[in-house]
Image (tube, rainbow, N blue to C red):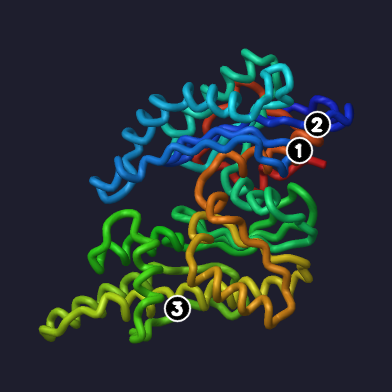
Amino acid sequence: MMQEEKVGTGSASGEPCYILAVETSCDETAVSVVKNGTEVLSNLISSQIETHKAFGGVVPEVASRKHVESITYMLDEAMQTSGITPREISAVAVTQGPGLVGALLVGIVAAKSAALAFGKPLIGTHHIAGHIYANQLEHDIVYPCIALVVSGGHTELVLMESEGHFQLIGRTRDDAVGEAYDKVARAIGFPYPGGPHVDRVAHESEEVVTLPRAWLEPDSYDFSFSGLKSAVLNVINQTKMRGETVHVGAIARGFQESVVEVLVEKAIRAMREYGAKQLLLCGGVAANRGLRTALRERCEREGIELLVPSMKYCTDNAAMIGAAAYAKWKRGEFTSLDMKADPGLSLEEWSVQT
């Protein structure tokens, strides 16, 4: 649960808002300074991909130790790069959840220390709200809108009727898209992280293996990808049993086309049903070329405005946390210093109070 306290209105003075933001929810250590929720003054990211590649996935304890090694240096570097002094900082924002609890704790302790040292308020921030508001760093968001969140741990459709208000209308019932990509990539022989490899060979292949689409109930906005993953494994096993060559590209293309079709169709249907003005694509899988292309082409045909962040804001970064925290800062909704890491933090409960 959030420990929030209402402390006036953050924007009452009319002065610029400079948020020092920290993100350590998984395997990227990131620190940023963001002005007024839209202008990125510094955005540092230290990736651990090479470290975890040897294990075929993120090892939580290793991730936490790597965060500890770099967070202090990155805080200092982000402040220097931004050209902003501690006195000018308006608030310190940090990812409270969801994420790996040990990794979250490193960022939270660092952010609390900075808030105390600078004498500034703390804003515990939702990781997925950050991914959604990554779009605000480059675009003007118009409400109501629908956000399609696609990442390693999350696949969700979110209705936003106004700034900072989130209503979950669909979610994955099993594997998230990014998780399914990594599992399929491993099955066809690609290293971690496998998503970019699957995306690449899917585009290169002229052949395709037709795979099932999991639509679920007719009116459902939920997703399911575990059956698709099983279908891929079944194709691979049957091909090997027949002594035939496994056509990696054809399988990757079939898998990607199945995933993309379901994501696109459900997102477009949600846009129509809720009368949304924009569709926001967000999360690490938003960097997937197949999904970006298919969604853009469909939105052009439907006359729907699509917002997609630049590649640098799709994966985990702290600038997105600063952008999301700005909605809380404007309303003076700050977090007490006894805030705890919350791996299961609810996006709907994190919504602004006013």
**Which residue is found at the position 50% from the left and 55% from the top?**
284
Q: Nearer the viewer, residue 73 or 27?
A: 73
The three-letter amino acid code for the residue at tag 2 is Pro
Depth check, mark 3 against mark 1: the one in front is: 1
Q: CA distance from mark 2 to mark 1?
A: 6 Å
Q: Locate residue 246: give its quadrant.
A: bottom left
Identify the residue position indicated by label 2 in the image.
Answer: 16
Identify whether 215 is placed above or below 74: below
Q: Amino acid at mark 1?
A: Asn
Q: Tell me if residue 272 comes above or below residue 186 in the rendering.
A: below
The residue drawn where x is 76% and y is 56% is 141
Tally of numbered discs: 3
Q: Earlier in the sequence, mark 2 or mark 1?
A: 2
Residue sitting at x 69%, y 15%: 119
**Frontmost residue, 8 versus 56:** 56
Q: Evaluate if marks 3 and 2 touch, with contact meaning CB atoms under 8 Å apart.
A: no
> Percent x, y for residue 80?
59, 24
- Quadrant assignment for the N terminus: top right
Crowd rating for badge 2 (residues with CA inside 10 Å; few <14, some 14–19, many 20+): few
Residue at which label 1 appears: 36
What residue would you read off at disc 3?
Answer: 257
Q: Position of residue 323 (x, y in %)?
A: 68, 42
